[in-house]
Amino acid sequence: MNPTLQTQLHHRSIRSFKDEAVSDEMLAQIIAAAHQAPTSMNAQEISLVVVRDAERRARIAELTGGMNYIAQAPVFIAIIIDFNKTDLALRNTGKTQLIHESMEGFGVGAVDAGIVLGTMIAAAESLGLGIVPIGGIRRDPQGIVDLLALPPLTFAVVGLCIGHIAIDAPVKPRLNISTFRHDERYDASSYSAAIAAYDATLMQHWQNIGRSDGTPWSTSLAPFQSVYYPAVRPVAAMQGLLNDK
Amino acid sequence: MNPTLQTQLHHRSIRSFKDEAVSDEMLAQIIAAAHQAPTSMNAQEISLVVVRDAERRARIAELTGGMNYIAQAPVFIAIIIDFNKTDLALRNTGKTQLIHESMEGFGVGAVDAGIVLGTMIAAAESLGLGIVPIGGIRRDPQGIVDLLALPPLTFAVVGLCIGHIAIDAPVKPRLNISTFRHDERYDASSYSAAIAAYDATLMQHWQNIGRSDGTPWSTSLAPFQSVYYPAVRPVAAMQGLLNDK
């Protein structure tokens, strides 16, 4: 198996980082890889804001509600849906952009943000660095808009911590692959049994690594009972995105 | 530079594939890498539908409005936002899922779909295969729902063609990195000059590769003047997603 696949199959999120900078060269390589990732229609409607300043990382940790590894990891990267860039290009040709007001636009931006994130994960892990993706930057999106000086038509949809690994983490088991890979047609007939088995597997995993606060997977989904980051929609709308098309 | 980064920096989308199967082993490796990718809160709310049947790929090409490389590439993978999986788990614990009705939910699903897509791109390209992402499966989302038998709470947000490369493509230039990487704060002061320079660079690129139909980048964004896949929102709503929270 080649080194890329080996690294990918060994993915685990890291939440304990050394007090050691990520070199400018490594960071530039990770960002160069992301810069070359594909975007829908080559629109390149993604931007990154790299935050290395310690006080600003501490502020981001606060805005997420206490993800303290953001303050600890030397690099935080906010991934921005950036329809400001495409709007500027269109306006220069005398045209008016509409896509940013639609679900289609937000969806394209979010997918392309995910591609950039997945690309940076592969790049950073290939360099032996640890990473953890941060959805928590959607907890207080207005706070992030203010901190990163995000103009209209932009929105920080997800983040990434990168650093040298202090305490490594084990690879977390996944639901059986039968719940992930469908051939030709979607088929959920294996789901119930796979979920029950995974609830047990995950409890065994927590026990193996000495995590007494671990819960079965089904229980861990409790936040999905509510819209746990309810400010996403109104703040995106204030940024000029998502006006219901 | 390590092999993962080398591959990533050489990314280009391929639209010409050999009439040669992707081996079961390679396909399994690509999907295993994606299966291990991180998801928000470990929700694993993504599923894949692998389409290898030639008639079904031809039908998907039709639904996209004529992306014939989907019929040509031996493997097409639809990436599905799958809140059916998490809903089932929650219902088994006596709870009611709400997240799928929200922007937050659709955004999380789309980002995680993008992470899976980025992960599969790195995996497939590390194996020497060619890929092209397919946003066109959002052109006729109801047709895709019917073809893939997608139940409520699921939505095919993006696709991927994979195959052995017949005609290789050059690496396409990108906008200057100053429009992609911001440090500490978003700063668009370089955008106008970078866009003008890129319009010229891209025209030179089209000329270099003998594409007489190439346009400047700013002109190529013309589809952003409208919601070019307007069925996304109503079909997602019919699937039970996005009820305006």
Image (cartoon, coloured by chain):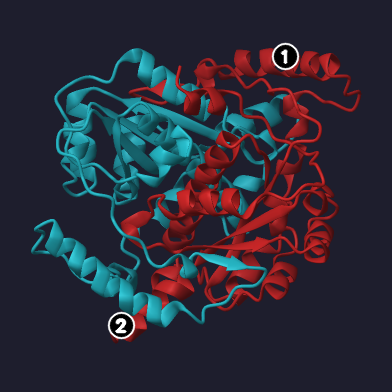
Chain colours: A cyan, B red
A51 vs A212: above or below: above
- In the displayed image of the protein, which residue is found farthest to the right? B212
Query: Is A100 on the left or on the right of A131, as rendered?
Result: right
Within 10 Å of disc 1 (Cα), the crowding (few <14, some 14-19, many 20+) is some
Q: Earlier in the sequence, mark 2 or mark 1?
A: 2
Instruction: Indicate the position of residue B19 as horizontal and vertical percent values.
Output: 82, 47
The residue carrying mark 1 is: B201
* Foreground residue among B161 and A69: B161
Chain identity of mark 2: B
Give the Cα distance between marks 2 and 1.
Answer: 55 Å
Screen quadrant of the C terminus of chain A: bottom right
Q: Secondary structure at mark 1?
A: helix
Residue B149's tag is none
* Foreground residue among A130 and B213: A130
Q: Which residue is found at the position 58% from the left and 16% from the top?
A: B176
Query: Is A136 on the left or on the right of B49, as rendered?
Result: left
Q: Is residue B165 in view from this perspective? A: yes
Circle 1: residue type:
Thr
Q: Which residue is found at the position 50% from the left and 17% from the top?
A: B178
Q: Is residue A219 in view from this perspective? A: no
Q: Which residue is found at the position 73% from the left and 35% from the top?
A: B221
The residue carrying mark 2 is: B95
Q: Secondary structure at mark 2?
A: loop
